[in-house]
């Protein structure tokens, strides 16, 4: 290993260590920080176990945990992406299953130490990285937090592509190419460390909370400064479109359609809904209206024979699955249970 490569690896380890400490400091305030800290530890493990003196030959016992942690970086990246960019994300034991599976595959590859097992590990890692990148980009169109929306496309995506590049390099390289490519790998990981550090030190958007009583134009959330005359006009127009015209029922409805109908730039509409109405994403904002309409219909004894699917489709939901998930997330019960409680006669006291 040359002095140049050693310097690159040392710098990356220092950046990852700084990032881990920052995330550990913020764990109580930002639940997603735990995934960031673990991701940084995986980065440190990679920089150690992929060093030229250790990459070839038998794997000593002390190196096994580092090699497993290194391989699990792709799974942790996916968890980190979900925790930071998906407002519906809630910690659960089953979310760790991809990491457990990848760790198991890595242990198998270490024990067998053949070409095929390591290629299986590489392919599994690439799949998880692709899932993480998809998670980063999937909700960008409806993200109302401008800082987070920018990070989706630039830093977070760069992080995923860098991990994917390293995994692809390991997948395609022969043993000779791997030795020659260690400086390239170290350079990529330094870029990854820089991107991750920028995310960890700069991205401080609030963590998501369940919108059990989501604000609407009729009940705006508290803002740091009062709305000016132009914003009040926009809010009134927005309230008319959503509550009177029920534009959210239209097919292919989205934030672009709403911005066109209001005749304002899309970025201004995002800022308006986020800063004046307190919503973090456009889907949550629209669903607050759709769910209010469906709950009213399910509470109406006169509509007791109308199928739940019909009610959901009339309110603008595209299928029953997303409707059921959104409904239970808001009320804690299924639409069927909600209707039964609201429409069945209550026993006399």
Image (cartoon, grey):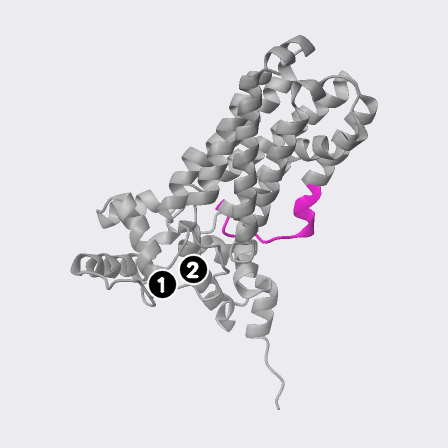
Circle 2 sits in a helix, a strand or a loop, which is it? helix
- Which residue corresponds to mark 2? 288
How many marks can you see? 2
Q: If the image is split into quadrants, where does the N terminus sit? A: top right
90 part of magenta stretch: yes
Residue 109 location, quadrant: top right
> Residue pushed farthest front?
3
Residue that appears at 46% across and 40% down:
199
Q: If the image is split into quadrants, where does the C terminus sit? A: bottom right
Work out whether residue 320 can be spotted: no
Q: Which mark is residue 216?
A: 1
Figure check: 186 above or below 105: above
- Asked if marks 1 and 2 touch (Cβ < 8 Å), the reply is yes
- Residue 176 in percent (x, y) is at 66, 8
- Residue 322 in percent (x, y) is at 53, 50
255 left or right of 186 in image:
left
Residue that appears at 32% across and 43% down:
256
166 part of magenta stretch: no
- Residue 142 in percent (x, y) is at 40, 45
Residue that appears at 57% across and 35% down:
131
> Residue pushed farthest right?
112
Front-lying residue, 46 or 341: 46
Figure check: 290 above or below 125: below
Circle 1 sits in a helix, a strand or a loop, which is it? loop
- Residue 6 in percent (x, y) is at 58, 22
Q: Which residues are magenta?
A: 85-97
Residue that appears at 59% across and 39% down:
39
Q: Residues within 10 Å of mark 1 (few under 14, many from 20)?
A: many
Residue 267 location, quadrant: top left
Q: Residues within 10 Å of mark 2 (few under 14, many from 20)?
A: many
């Amino acid at each position: 290993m040359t002095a140049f490569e050693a310097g690159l690896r040392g710098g990356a380890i220092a950046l990852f260590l700084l990032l881990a400490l920052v995330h550990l400091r913020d764990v109580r305030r930002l639940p997603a920080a735990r995934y960031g800290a673990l991701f940084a530890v995986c980065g440190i493990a990679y920089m150690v176990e992929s060093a030229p003196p250790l990459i070839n030959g038998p794997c000593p016992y002390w190196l096994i945990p580092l090699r497993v942690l290194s391989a699990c970086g792709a799974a942790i990246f996916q968890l980190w992406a979900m925790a930071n960019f998906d407002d519906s994300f809630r910690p659960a034991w089953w979310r760790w299953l991809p990491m457990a599976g990848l760790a198991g595959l890595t242990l198998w590859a270490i024990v067998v130490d053949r070409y095929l097992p390591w290629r299986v590990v590489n392919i599994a890692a690439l799949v998880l990285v692709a899932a993480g990148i998809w998670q980063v980009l999937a909700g960008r169109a409806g993200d109302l937090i401008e800082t987070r929306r920018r990070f989706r496309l630039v830093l977070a995506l760069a992080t995923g592509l860098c991990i994917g590049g390293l995994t692809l390099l390991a997948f395609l390289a022969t043993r000779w190419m791997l030795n020659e490519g260690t400086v390239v790998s170290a350079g990529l990981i330094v870029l990854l460390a820089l991107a991750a550090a920028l995310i960890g030190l700069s991205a401080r958007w609030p963590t998501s909370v369940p919108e059990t009583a989501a604000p609407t134009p009729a009940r705006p959330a508290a803002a740091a400064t009062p709305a000016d005359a132009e914003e009040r006009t926009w809010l009134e127009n927005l309230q008319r479109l959503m509550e009177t015209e029920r534009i959210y029922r239209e097919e292919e409805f989205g934030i672009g359609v709403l911005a066109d109908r209001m005749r304002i730039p899309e970025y201004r509409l995002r800022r308006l809904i986020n800063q004046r109405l307190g919503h973090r994403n456009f889907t949550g904002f629209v669903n607050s209206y759709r769910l209010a309409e469906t709950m009213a219909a399910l509470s109406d004894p006169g509509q007791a024979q109308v199928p739940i699917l019909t009610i959901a489709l009339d309110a603008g939901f595209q299928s029953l699955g997303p409707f059921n998930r959104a409904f239970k997330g808001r009320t804690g019960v299924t639409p069927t249970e909600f209707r039964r409680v609201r429409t069945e006669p209550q026993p006399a006291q």
